[in-house]
Amino acid sequence: MQVQARRGDWVQVHLVILEAGDRAPQVPEDTAKVPLEMKVKGCLVEETAGIGDTVSVETAVGRKITGKMVAIDPPYDVGFGPPPVELRCVGAELRRFLGQEGSRS
């Protein structure tokens, strides 16, 4: 049974920014041979999704990113473990509560 994430769950997505052939000509040869990739953590936008699905997330600063979901409830690599549930999307919730959805001061 595949684990499903639900809207608002903290997930990580992976996407390719530039394919190997599209890299800048001045990058080192070994770097030019691989794609430029990005991993982003955020709150799932879709109702439900599983690992490997293409999904959108909303980051802590409100940016929307679409990529392939690679982890559900991913921990931070610094060794503090997964973020507390209460703090994951508190910034967006607070802005909605205060009626300042478009404001990013």
Image (tube, rainbow, N blue to C red):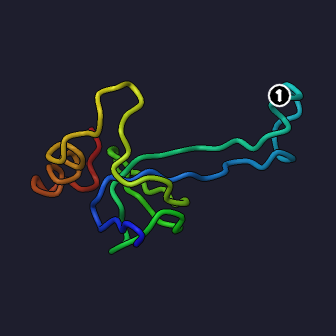
Q: Is residue 11 above or below residue 2?
A: above
Residue 77 in the image: state x and y as whole percent.
42, 30
> Does residue 39 appear left or right of residue 100 in this picture?
right
Q: Position of residue 23 (x, y in %)?
A: 81, 40
Q: Residue at x 83, y 46 (%)?
A: 22
Which quadrant does the C terminus fall into? top left
Q: Depth check: 47 or 77 in front?
A: 77
Q: Residue at x 32, y 52 (%)?
A: 10
Above or below, comparing residue 88 to residue 65 in the picture: above
| Foreground pick, 61 / 31 | 31
User: Does residue 24 sit above or below 10 in this rendering?
Assistant: above
For residue 94, side relative to residue 104 (left or right): left
Q: Mark 1 falls on what kind of element?
A: loop
Q: Position of residue 55 (x, y in %)?
A: 47, 66
Check disc 1 and give the amino acid type: Val
Query: Would residue 16 appear left or right of 3 to someone viewing this image?
Result: right
Q: Residue furthest left?
A: 97
Q: Residue at x 32, y 45 (%)?
A: 60
Q: Residues within 10 Å of mark 1 (few under 14, many from 20)?
A: few
Residue to which mark 1 is pinned: 27
2 or 26: nearer the viewer = 2
Q: Residue at x 54, y 64 (%)?
A: 52
- Name the side, left or right, on which 80 lies relative to 69: left
Indicate the quadrant where residue 72 lies: bottom left
Q: Quadrant of the N terminus?
A: bottom left
The percent position of residue 15, horizontal first and vertical second, equals 60, 53
> In the depicted view, which residue is nearer to us: 46 or 62?
46
What is the total number of numbered labels drawn onto the structure image? 1
